[in-house]
Amino acid sequence: MAVVSRPSTASAERGSVGSERAWEKAGRSRSPEKALERLRAAAASCRDCPLWRGTTQTVFGEGSAGALIMLVGEQPGDHEDLQGRPFVGPAGGLLDRALAEAGIDRPLTYTTNAVKHFKYRMRGKRRIHQRPDSEEISVCRQWLDAELEVVRPRVLVCLGATAASALLGGRPSIERDRGRPLPSDLAPVVMLTAHPSAALRQRSSEARHAAIAALVADLEVARREAEKD
Ligand code: URA
């Protein structure tokens, strides 16, 4: 059964300290869809950290404003930077497949990243991913907090350690903490799982299959939690 989204009646009027800057730039709206549109437009010209330099654009979240499940990755990659949409490259392809296997309809989720610009270094002509640092993550948190306020997902899934650490603080361990609800007041259920690119990095097809199966199993937990009344 595919997870459905609820009617998006959530008000985007509440505020939290973290997102206040984002709301100042975007302006509030009662309609969650409009609120996301305004946030997206405001984030497009964000220059609060140097990461925007050398990128094509801000990659804001996308999906349903009434999503029951929100997925948070680390930062856009090369494909995402060029297309302006989260998880559209190889990791996104794998995420799509895992979501489908777990019975989750991606368009009914909301997908975003902890950091909204692609951080990279050049190797020859290739742009090589670099992990964002804690300062960059914390400056970008305003947008993630505002997205959370609007969407108010029932289940928040952190994809990988960077997203988990950005949202939960500390040093979460994927192995120890994956696939079960964790203490957090960001959403009724907050979980973490491995980043889809971890499966892509596996050398043997056996290890890759095992990594994908584990990702699907965690997403199934998310689906079951989202379907609870
Ligand atoms: N990896 C991420 O963490 N996010 C994306 O959007 C793409 C790849």
Image: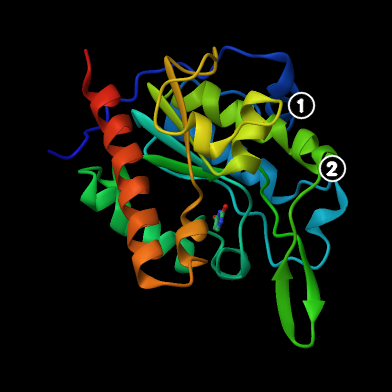
Give the image location of residue 48, x and y in percent. Answer: 84, 42
Type of the residue with mark 2: Asp
Mark 1, secondary structure of its residue: helix
Q: Could you tell me if the residues under marks 2 and 1 are in contact, i.e. CB atoms within 8 Å? A: yes
The answer to whether residue 66 is seen in the rendering is no
What SS does tag 2 mark? loop
In front of the other: 106 or 179:
179
The residue depicted at 41 percent of the width and 18 percent of the height is: 10
- Ligand 1 found in image quarter: bottom right
N-term-proximal mark, 2 vs 1 = 1
**Residue at the spot of label 2:** 48
- From this view, report whether residue 213 is shown above or below residue 184: below
Q: Residue at x 42, y 14 (%)?
A: 188
Q: Give the Cα separation between the discs numbered 2 and 1.
A: 10 Å
Tell me which residue sits at (35%, 19%) in the image: 9
Q: Height in image: 36 above or below 41?
A: above
- The residue to which callout 1 is attached is 21
Of the pair 127 and 195, the residue shown nearer to us? 195
Q: Amino acid at mark 1?
A: Arg
Q: Quadrant of the N terminus?
A: top left
